Image (spheres, rainbow, N blue to C red):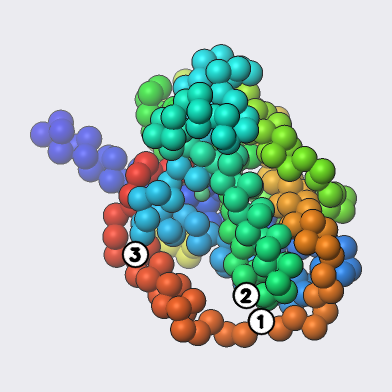
Amino acid sequence: MVRIFIMALVLYLPFYAHAWGFYGHQKINYYAVFLLPPEMLVFFKPQIDYLAVHSVDPDKRRYLLEQEGPRHYIDLDHYGPAPYVSLPRDWQTAVAACSMDSLVKYGIGPWWIQVMLERLTKAFMVKDPEQILKMAAELGHYVADLHVPLHACSNHNGQLTGQHGIHGFWESRVPELLAEKEWDFIIGPARYYRDPLSLIWKRVLQSAAAADTVLRIEKLLRAQFSSDQVYAYEERNGKLTRQFSSAYTVAYDQLLNGMIERRMRASVEAVASFWLTAWINAGQPPLRSLVRHPLGGDALLSMQQLEAAYKNSPIKGREHD
Ligand SMILES: [Zn+2]
C-alpha cells in the first residue's frame, strides 16, 4: 500500500525533462540574436523563430540516439575536488589520461561544444543557410546547458540527497515564472572569443562551483515549508498542473540571490559570442543574400524521425539533463 502511494506521488511530482527547459533554451537563443552585429543580424533576425524553436532539438535527440546524452553535461565532481586537476582540458590529452569510455560515461559537454563550433564555422565558410541555422540553434543549446550548475555535477537531479525534481525546478520552473516578468535581458554586444574552449571551461567550472549552493539552499528552504506549501496546483501551459508552488519558487529564487538570472544572462552572452566567433573565424562571409529554403529530402526525413522519437520513445540515458 505504502509503495503504491509512493509511486502515485512520484507520478504526480513536477516533471521537466530538459535542461533550461524548452522555455529557457528558446528564450536564450532568441535573446542572443539581438547581441549580434548588423552583418549577422541581417540573416539571423528573420530566422529568429527557427533559432528559438530548434534550440531544443538536441534534447529531443536524446530520445533517438544513445550517444546524445553525454554531450549535454559533465560530472566534474567525478574528477576529485575543484579545480579537477586529474582532468585535462584538451580532448586528446583527456582521452589519453582517462579513456574514451570513461569520458563518455561522465559527460563530454565542453568538447562537444568545440565540435559544434567547428561545424558552424564550416557552414559559414560554405555559406549554407540551412546548416548555419541548424548548427547555430544547436550550438546555442549545448553552450546554455553548461551554464546550468546541475549539468556539471553527478547529483544532477538531487537523486543522491533526496531532492528529486530539483533539476527542473532550478532550470524550468523558476525561469518560467520569473524570466519574462522580472529579469533583465538587456545585454552588451557579442564578443569574439580568441580561445573558445577556455571560455567554456571557465563557465563550466563556475557551474560546478555553484552546484552545491543550488542543492544546499533548496534543502534549507524545504525545512521551512510544509509539503502542502511546497507544491500546488497551478496553471502551466494552460493546464492545471501540480508543481512547485509560486511562493516556494519565488522564495528559492530570492535565497539564490539572482543566480539563475545571472546564469541565463551569461548563457545569452556566450551563445551570441560563439555564433560571432564562428562567423569571424569563417572569414566574415556576407550573409545578406542567404535565403533559407524549406526543409526537404534527407533533412526533412531526419527532422520527422527526431519528432517521432521524441513523442513515442523513452529517453536514452539519464533523465533531467
Ligand atoms: Zn540539453
Marker disc for residue 292: 1
> Residue shown at 58%/41% (left/top)?
111
Amino acid, disc 1: Arg
Query: Dots 2 and 1: beta carbons under 8 Å?
Result: yes
Q: Give how far apart the Cα atoms at labels 2 and 1 are.
A: 6 Å
Mark 2 packing: few (<14 Cα in 10 Å), some, or many (20+)?
A: some
Q: Give how far apart the Cα atoms at labels 2 and 3 are.
A: 22 Å
SS category of the residue bearing label 2: helix
Residue marked by disc 2: 130
Sequence-first disc among 1 and 3? 1
Mark 3 packing: few (<14 Cα in 10 Å), some, or many (20+)?
A: some
Amino acid, disc 2: Glu
Judged left or right of residue 42, residue 147 is left
> Residue 143's x, y, as percent?
64, 47
**Please, which residue is most extreme toward the left here?**
1
Do we see residue 304 in this rendering? yes
In the displayed structure, 46 sits above or below 105; it is below
Residue marked by disc 3: 309
> Residue 129's x, y, as percent?
68, 76
> Residue 80's x, y, as percent?
52, 15
Question: Disc 1, ligand 1: is the CB inside 8 Å?
Answer: no
Judged left or right of residue 43, residue 108 is left
Q: Quadrant of residue 228?
A: top left
Sequence-first disc among 2 and 3? 2
In the displayed structure, 69 sits above or below 180; it is above
> Residue 108's x, y, as percent?
51, 39
Q: Quadrant of residue 93?
A: top right
In which quadrant of the rendered image does the N terminus lie?
top left
Query: Dots 2 and 3: beta carbons under 8 Å?
Result: no
